[in-house]
Image: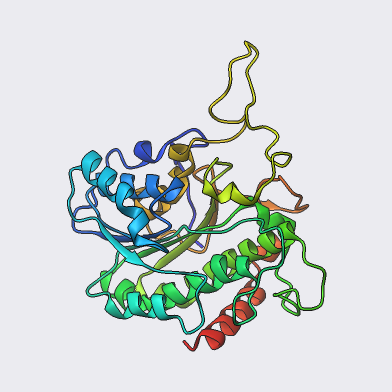
Amino acid sequence: MSLVTDIPFGARSTAADVVRDVDLYGKRAVITGGASGIGLETALALAGAGAEVTLAVRDPRAAGTAVERIRRETGRDDVGVARVDLADLADLDSVRAFTEGWSGPLHILVNNAGVMAVPELTLTPQGREIQYAVNLTGHAALTLGLHGALRAAGGARVVTVGSSAHLMAPVDFDDIHFAHRPYEAWTAYGQSKSAAILFTVALAGHWAADGITANALHPGGIMTNLQRHLSDEQLRFVGATNDAGEKLDVPPGWKTPQQGAATQVLLAASPLVEGVTGRYFEDCRPAALQPEPTAGGTGVAAWAIDAASAERLWDGTRKELGY
């Protein structure tokens, strides 16, 4: 794994800060979930730096406002939208249609879309727990299907949004989809993010010879549509006030969407991390190994970067998807 030093960005940096002097003209980027939240901020930053951006979303019609905003604020008219439903894995129709229809090189793939804390056990028609299906399996199918395009780019980057929630649960390879153990929303979410990091570690090793780098990250706490399944009690800090009694737009300790997008934009575009691969970042820096993983903690758990587990997940996922 490459070393990273002297990164001048941190928790309060924004995506715009990261790409201020970056030139992405001639580069092409795909961002899942790019029509809202930190995905949209990522799209704005990459397009603003010159990249041709495609938003891969479940409902292209709903992405119209995002496309208009990106075009208006960046002055670029080469903003595309494609339907990619990461949860609809009956026969991978939308994912396969997108990957098979992609023409030419792809320089940046940002696996940003996600689902969090679904309160009840929800299975896809194939019996996959929905958070695992979206956060790992769907993105794995998309990434594997775009291998040729990424290889053709020469120096392509794959960036996957993980979460500090991975500290809550490793992958239970014997019962990934809760067929036998009791379902718990945060355990399922944490497992899916541990899986996403493991897949990144495996990807980095297997595709290094193709000049492709792969890194994962924790964006921080950001108030977006991702929180739609949380109760008011779980979001108890919403409506928090400062010492003067003024309502805060951002809960204490949380980030704005612009700040939340900074780490994935760094990994997608910055020359400061050129050649870095197989790493997990937070606050624009490589995360330290966390010897005692706990909910709400920082760092990366050993179970999420374990080489043997990464290979087990890689082999199982590719077999399941037919790659």
The location of residue 117, given as percent across then percent down, is: 66, 56
Toward the viewer: 64 or 145?
64
Residue 139: percent from left, percent from top: 48, 69
Q: Is residue 300 visible?
A: no
- Asked if residue 69 is positioned above or below residue 173 in the image, the reply reads above
The correct choice, above or below, for 60 with respect to 69 in the image is below
Q: What residue is at 59 percent from the left and 42 percent from the top?
A: 221
Outermost residue toward the top in this view? 244
Front residue of 294 and 229? 229
- The image shows residue 6 at horizontal and vertical percentages of 45, 41
Find residue 163 and report its horizontal and vertical position in percent.
60, 53
Residue pictured at 59% horizontal, 49% vertical: 228
Q: Is residue 44 above or below residue 172?
A: above
- Asked if one can make out residue 100 in the rendered structure from this viewpoint, the answer is yes
Residue beneath the point at 58% across and 71% down: 133
Q: How many marks?
A: 0
- Residue placed most toward the observer, 94 or 170: 94
What residue do we see at 43% from left, 57% from top? Answer: 33
Q: Is residue 237 left or right of residue 82?
A: right
Residue 61 horizontal side relative to residue 36, left or right: left
